Image (cartoon, rainbow, N blue to C red):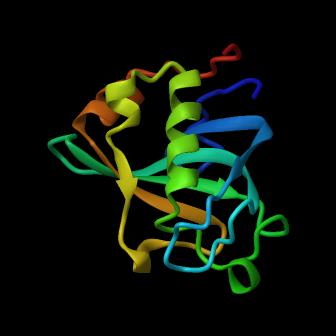
Amino acid sequence: MTVYCQDTEANEGHNMIQLKNGVILECDGSGLWGAEPDATVEIQKLVVPYVNEEEDFGELRVYFDPTFWNIRQDGLIYTDDGFLRQLREILEKLTFTPQAANDVEYSEQGMQGENYVSLDVGKAFLDEWLEIPGNNDHL
């Protein structure tokens, strides 16, 4: 993993962490929608496109390269325990506390995208997400 930054203009005004070199995560095959054991996916950025008014619930989208992972061939990553466990580890490396990293769970199946995994986030995660200063270039 390398550098992260928050870039609000480049992503339609949403807070974003760009993973400059991408990060490879491995699925463990426990998902209900087709991810095979040991299948890998490269994640590229994290975006929070929605936060409710109380700032205690939101959506986190974890974007991946669709040429690396094609949901029509590889299935949905949704519900894969290995992917979620490794994502939480990445969040901790990005300076999120374990409490904030564990405040991330898969959203519903219909929220999953062609090139992202949708996750629900709560107050612990959002409190830290909203504190990330813009244009960080360190990790």
- Nearer the observer, 63 or 101: 101
Residue 49 position within the rendered picture, expressed as x and y whole percent measured from the top left? 44, 53
Give the residue drawn at x 67%, y 27%. 4
Task: Please identify the quadrant where the C terminus is shown.
Answer: top right
| Residue 113 drawn above or below residue 47 | below
Residue 91 position within the rendered picture, expressed as x and y whole percent measured from the top left? 52, 32
Give the residue drawn at x 69%, y 13%. 138
| Rendered image quadrant of residue 67 | bottom right
| Rendered image quadrant of residue 135 | top right
Q: Is residue 129 left or right of residue 81?
A: left
- Nearer the observer, 67 or 130: 67
Give the residue drawn at x 51%, y 25%. 92
Residue 14 position within the rendered picture, expressed as x and y whole percent measured from the top left? 49, 46
Q: Is residue 115 left or right of residue 108?
A: right
| Residue 22 drawn above or below residue 49 | above
- Nearer the observer, 64 or 40: 40
Residue 107 position within the rendered picture, expressed as x and y whole percent measured from the top left? 37, 64
Q: Residue furthest top?
A: 138
| Rendered image quadrant of residue 41 | bottom right
Q: Is residue 90 left or right of residue 98?
A: right
